[in-house]
Image (cartoon, helix red, strand yellow):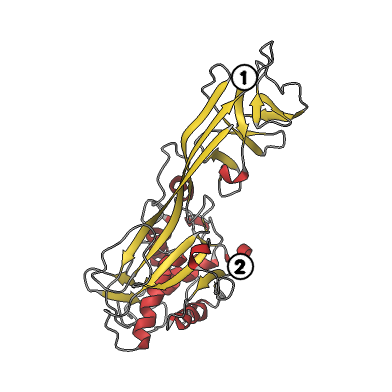
Amino acid sequence: MKKKHSILILSVLLFSFASCSSSGDNENGSDDDNGGSGGPIVDDSGILTNLRSTNLNSDAFPWNSVPDNDNGCDLVSLTDGKLKRWDIGNQGPIPVKINGLPLVPESLDLIEERLGLTLFDRTSIANTADENIERGIIFAAEEETDPFGYSFDNSYGCGGVSFQFEQEYFYEDIELEYDEDENVIGYDYPVLGQAFDGEGNVVGSVLDGTPYIFNDEDVVVGILLEEDRLMLDGDGNAICTWLYSDPLYNEDGHAIGATVSGAESGYFMIQGETIETGYYDAAGRINGLILVRLDTMECQFSDDEDEIEMIVNKLGYALGLGSNFDGYGDFGITGDFEINDNFWNVLNTLYRNPIGSDESSLEIHVIRS
């Protein structure tokens, strides 16, 4: 068996940002108080509309950043209409590396204070080299750190947010050995169990000491899979594989392998398949690496409060917000960072509902200023 792997690190640039203006807090439920920026503070229906546009809709950037595999089994399809965020409940607070940048701690404090939640782990990766961090949020000075993979238009001068994912080009040749009677060597090894297709039909036997699944004609119909090559739905059920082939199951219904094709004279090949590891998974968990690049040299801030608002705005993207809405940054037109309770209500609702929740099951959680 031969294996070759080549890793290509890509990224998706989220946004570059403009100069900043301040906005104040306000009482919720008002139809005309704009909190100092943006339009009116919206009601529950408006909060749901904003959440739909910025998070639930996976066709919107950045959720559509991981390429489709064209078979309906991809992150965009599996998470469309589902809530996507960091799994604070099961995995603990989000690791962050501040890298000594001023006002970042105060920005983290502000988010936790407004939501009444502990969201950030500020110690576990604090002394880890950036290149060795695989999960979390890294803050960096823009002039010192390149975004993941791509440069971007920095005409607004305030940095940007980028997300990392991997593409792995996977090649595997399966060569079978035969005895003098042309029987597959190893077929007499103990059978570990049977393999089933998605409908529960027996398709072959899993043999001890081999990665192969044979059918009754001694033809390899599948190979055993490592768990990280399985694509799981929101309930943790395997529905396809990163190899873009159908999973095979054992008698307990657990996926153990994937189908293969191309049998010819005992030679089988899986070639050119792509494994994508996104910064979020098929259950909607953000679980990758996000870079927040800050450059305040060209930004004009009247005071620290304005600069903190800019950092909070960027953190919104890192926490699970995508498309802008009124009260959450209207860039390119006014050049202003807009943060008001429309932003806080969406973020609070995002982190008060379970990951993978659909729109019909969401409970709206309004910030009380």
Q: Residue at x 62, y 44 (%)?
A: 227
Point out which mark residue 255 bears: none
Question: Given the image, on which type of amino acid does mark 2 rest?
Answer: Gly
On the image, the x and y values in percent for residue 25 come to 39, 84
Q: Residue furthest left?
A: 333
The answer to whether 175 appears left or right of 328 in the picture is: right
Secondary structure category for the residue under label 1: loop
On the image, the x and y values in percent for residue 20 come to 29, 79
* Front residue of this view, candidates 75 and 121: 121
Q: Residue at x 46, y 66 (%)?
A: 319
In three-dimensional space, the C-alpha distance between marks 2 and 1, rounded to whole angstroms, equals 46 Å
Q: Residue furthest bottom?
A: 303
State which quadrant residue 126 falls in: bottom right
Secondary structure category for the residue under label 2: loop
Find disc 2 in the rendering and name its residue: 92
What quarter of the picture does the N terminus occupy? top right
* Front residue of this view, candidates 369 and 252: 252
On the image, the x and y values in percent for residue 73 come to 48, 40
Find disc 1 in the rendering and name its residue: 219
When the figure is inspected, residue 276 is found, relative to residue 206, above or below; the finding is: below
* Front residue of this view, candidates 319 and 23: 319
On the image, the x and y values in percent for residue 184 come to 67, 19
What quarter of the picture does the C terminus occupy? bottom left
Question: Given the image, on which type of amino acid does mark 1 rest?
Answer: Val
Choose the circle earlier in sequence order: 2 or 1: 2
